[in-house]
Structures are given as C-alpha cells and as structure tokens.
Image (tube, rainbow, N blue to C red):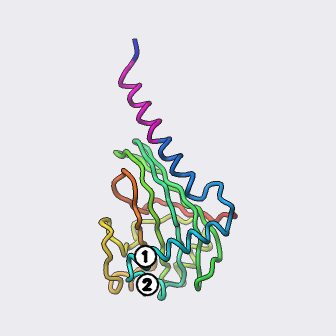
C-alpha cells in the first residue's frame, strides 16, 4: 500500500526545489566572474534609480552600497535564499559578496528580487567590511515598502545607519525581508 500524502508532499517539495535550483542558475552561480557581477550591479542600479527616483539622493548621501542584483529564495516549510553582488564605495566596486538566508516556518513558493543596502554612516560601512560574515537584523529601515511603493527618504533614513531597498520581485512567495540574511565576502 502506498502512502499518497507522502507522495504528494515529496512531489511538491521536489517541484519547489527544482524551481529554486532552476531560478538560481541565473543569479551568479557559475558566472564568468567580476565583469558579470559588475554588469548586473550596473543594470540593477539603473533600474532602481529609474523606478524609484528617491533612491538616487539616498545613494549620494551613503558612504557605500551593497548591491545584490538577483536573490533567489525558495521554501517549502524550510527555505533558503542565495545571491551574489558587489560593494560599491564612491561608485567603484571594492569587494564582492554572497548573500545566504535559511528560514523555517509556514512558507511555500519561490521568488526572485534585488536589493541594495545603503550604509549611511562610516561606522556602519566599516563594521560591515570588517566582519567575517555580517547578518542583517531587525534594525534595518526600508525605503521601498512591501507593496513596492517608494517612501520618503528624508526623516527615517537620516537616522538609520543601514537602509535597504528590496524591489523587482517576481515569483510565488509572499513577502521579502532581509532579517537573518548573512553576507560574506567572496572572490568570484
């Protein structure tokens, strides 16, 4: 006798995993290196500035920006996310980073999105660069809401050491938060 509920769960888990793996193929895994990541970062910044013009003024005030052009996130009960990007200081790439996140709880689906962390103080940028693996906490303020609306970047962001913009979402998973996301310096 076959357990049909196990078969359905196994099928659903396999489908979500294959969707996540298929989507991950385009997020920098196996890329040709720094030139590819830099081109994706440039395209991501151009999209962000044209879609959310208020982020341009924020970028001008920031001491540095970590740009993650494509993060793929998938989950079925347990989930994870992965992406690669670059840290820019003064408009120049200074390091490359990967981002990874593990999560648990009630979740199903997959999504892809881009995000940019704006380091608004020199201390926040220095702490990020000196850490062996920096994890995003609940103290990050967002300049683009979960609905994708642009928010004013004057009052809240002026006081926050790290500000995030999460945008360009595509997929079937609801919500995107950077809390618990770990960033690690890489050599592409």
Label 2 sits on residue: 58
Q: Quadrant of residue 145?
A: bottom left
Mark 1 crowd level (few <14, some 14–19, many ≥20, 10 Å Cα): many
Nearest to N terminus: mark 2 or mark 1: 2
Q: Please, is residue 160 above or below residue 16 in the view?
A: below
- Is residue 12 part of the magenta span, yes or no? yes
Measure how far apart labels 2 and 1 are at the Cα level.
Answer: 9 Å
Give coordinates of residue 93: x percent, y percent: 63, 77
- Residue 22: x %, y % from top left: 53, 47
- Image point 39% across, 31% down: which residue? 9
**Is label 2 or label 1 in front?**
2
Instruction: State left or right for residue 35 relative to residue 168.
Output: right
- Magenta-tinted stretch: 3-16
As drawn, the residue found furthest toward the top would be 1
**Residue assigned mark 1:** 163
Residues at badges 2 and 1 in contact (C-beta under 8 Å)? yes
Crowding at dot 2, Cα within 10 Å, few <14 / some 14-19 / many 20+, comes out as: some
Q: Main secondary structure of the magenta part?
A: helix
Work out whether 2 lies above or below 186.
above
């Amino acid at each position: 006798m076959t357990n049909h509920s196990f078969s359905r769960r196994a099928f659903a888990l396999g489908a979500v995993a294959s969707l996540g793996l298929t989507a991950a193929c385009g997020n920098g895994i196996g890329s040709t290196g720094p030139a590819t990541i830099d081109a994706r970062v440039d395209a991501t910044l151009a999209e962000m500035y044209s879609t959310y013009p208020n982020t341009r003024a924020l970028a001008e005030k920031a001491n540095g920006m970590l740009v993650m052009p494509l993060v793929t996130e998938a989950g079925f009960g347990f989930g994870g996310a992965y992406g690669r990007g670059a840290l820019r200081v003064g408009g120049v790439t200074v390091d490359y980073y990967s981002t990874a996140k593990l999560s648990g709880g009630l979740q199903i689906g997959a999504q892809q999105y881009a995000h940019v962390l704006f380091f608004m103080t020199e201390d926040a940028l220095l702490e990020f660069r000196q850490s062996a693996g920096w994890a995003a906490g609940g103290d990050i303020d967002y300049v683009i809401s979960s609905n994708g609306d642009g928010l004013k970047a004057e009052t809240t962001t002026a006081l926050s050491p790290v500000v995030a913009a999460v945008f360009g979402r595509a997929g079937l998973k609801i919500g995107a938060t950077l809390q618990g996301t770990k960033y690690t310096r890489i050599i592409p």
